[in-house]
Image (cartoon, rainbow, N blue to C red):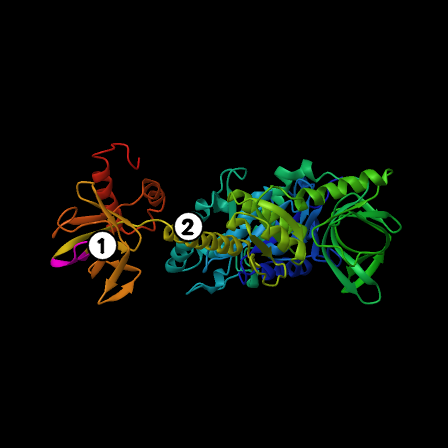
Amino acid sequence: MIRQPICAFMGHVDHGKTTVLDTIRHTAVAKSEAGAITQMISSSSISIDAIKKVCGGLIKDPSKITIPGLLLIDTPGHAAFTNLRKRGGNLADIAVLVIDINEGIMPQTTECIEILKQYKTPFVIALNKLDLLQGWRQREGLLLNVIDGQSESVKQAIEARLYGIVGKLYETGINADRFDRVSDYSKQFAIIPCAAIKGLGIPELLMVLIGLAQRYMESSLQTGSGPGKATVLEVKEEKGVGAVLDAVLYDGLIKIGDTIVIGNVDEPIISKVKTILVPEKGKLKSVKEAEASAGIKIAANNIEQVIPGVPVEVAGANIEETKAKVQAEVNEVMLSTETAGVVIKAESLGSLEALARLLNEKGIKVKKASVGKVTKKDIADASSEQNYAHRTILCFNSPADEAADVKIIKSDIIYHIIEQYEKWVEEEKIKQQQKALEALTMPGKMQILRECIFRQNNPCVVGVIVQSGVVKADVDLIKIDGSPAGTIKSIQIERETVDKAEKGKEVAISLPGITAGRQIKEDDILYVDVPESDFKELKKYKNLVKEEDIKLLKELAGIKRKQNPLWGV
């Protein structure tokens, strides 16, 4: 038996996901007999007869279609989409990515594309809000005819925006074109322009969806009457029933009285199906059984703490085998993956998996992944990391309080989390480098001023002008020929002792063990004698060292290499 393809709707906020979905449902109701469309929990089941009537002559040979219809997932948004998971991939067989033709590719659009690519989910693009283009004239008829009937300026605007979006999609690795220009649907993604609120383009969208499902998915849509397999979207309280699981049944059959195994953080939850509910004519109706694919509510015991995205399976003859299989699916996402890395949290299993995969693509190691609020154990795990970049907890739609010694980054958009993390790591890296720099001897160059030998020895005190770099107390000095020129004991400006002096400053320095007129004299150029080990370290921090200091280091290296050609190499 062939089941309905499961079709999820995604897109950036306010691009019209809900409008497209609502228009499909209402159009199908208007064009078909009563009962041809059934409102289901978080989903809508549209029969193939209703779709044929909506599409009319767009479907060339309706008799060849064996797909029974479409199950449209009514939980728009990428966050909900990540809950639609099953072992080995995503629950959705196909997706509709809704893009506002006026706004184009937005951050959540990009995120949706990345998630779809992760799960290898085929999708089509509904390019919505044609009717908001300046100069648009509303007409009745098929999409391409309505577009052809617009003014030249409107047609040019449509083409310009469409191919601007095609270009942006290409940058993300997506080769797309307008549906009637796609020569090979196995290699290109179809774009269907539409004005969902007016119903324009909806027949064409349904036609493309059914065509793709029929041509490329028929074999993967085979299902039987075996034990049901479902995914939890949400856990809700239903008046008069109690806690229920909003779920999508994607394979097999589920009946009242069945023992079900539900994936969980620690160990599977075993329960019995008390009630199966489906909506009918605006009300919930109890049914004895349901078969794939369908959106259903399941009432059962001990389900209050179930997390979204987990698998549900009807227990087979060997319940222990079912338990092991279900929990393995949860564990493959929840278990620690690296000996060192960041801690990640999410509100659902699917969201956790999506975050983990995107971090992996970025080369960001994950030490521990789990669902729910950040716990003391999570904070302890993160704070035990030696690498500052790993003392971090990344939270996708998961609550968290601030914690000492641990950086917590949270957002409801995965890319914002990753961007914030990468920005923070870079800032921390610079802080760490600056801290390391402070411990190194920085280069400095000065000249002894004429008539400024204030004391010849015990200690020698001379006036100098700092020509470049910085001069600090306790640094060794050399002359331009490489010979030693003592160690600065102290630095004074107008008889006040200071820690350092920078370029342009005239200061007095004291040099114990040096005699003016013997080792040093007026007009001598003195360099800070940067240790070779510090010189090598400074080369690592070129991004933080001033250009002037780099030039000065090169001068110093030139002096040193006259005696040792490999100095500092």
State the residue position of label 2: 163
Q: Residue at x 54, y 40 (%)?
A: 185
Q: Earlier in the sequence, mark 1 or mark 2?
A: 2
Q: Is residue 285 magenta?
A: no
Disc 1 packing (10 Å; few <14; some 14–19; many ≥20)? few
Looking at the rendering, which quadrant does residue 78 occupy?
A: bottom right
State the residue position of label 1: 458
> Is 97 placed left or right of 224 in the picture?
left
Q: Secondary structure at mark 2?
A: helix
- Labels 1, 2: front one: 1
Give the main secondary structure of the magenta stretch.
strand
In the picture as drawn, the residue positioned furthest to the front comes out as: 458
Looking at the rendering, which quadrant does residue 202 occupy?
A: bottom right
Q: Position of residue 528 (x, y in %)?
A: 25, 48
Say above or below: 48 vs 12: above
Residue 121 visible (yes or no): no
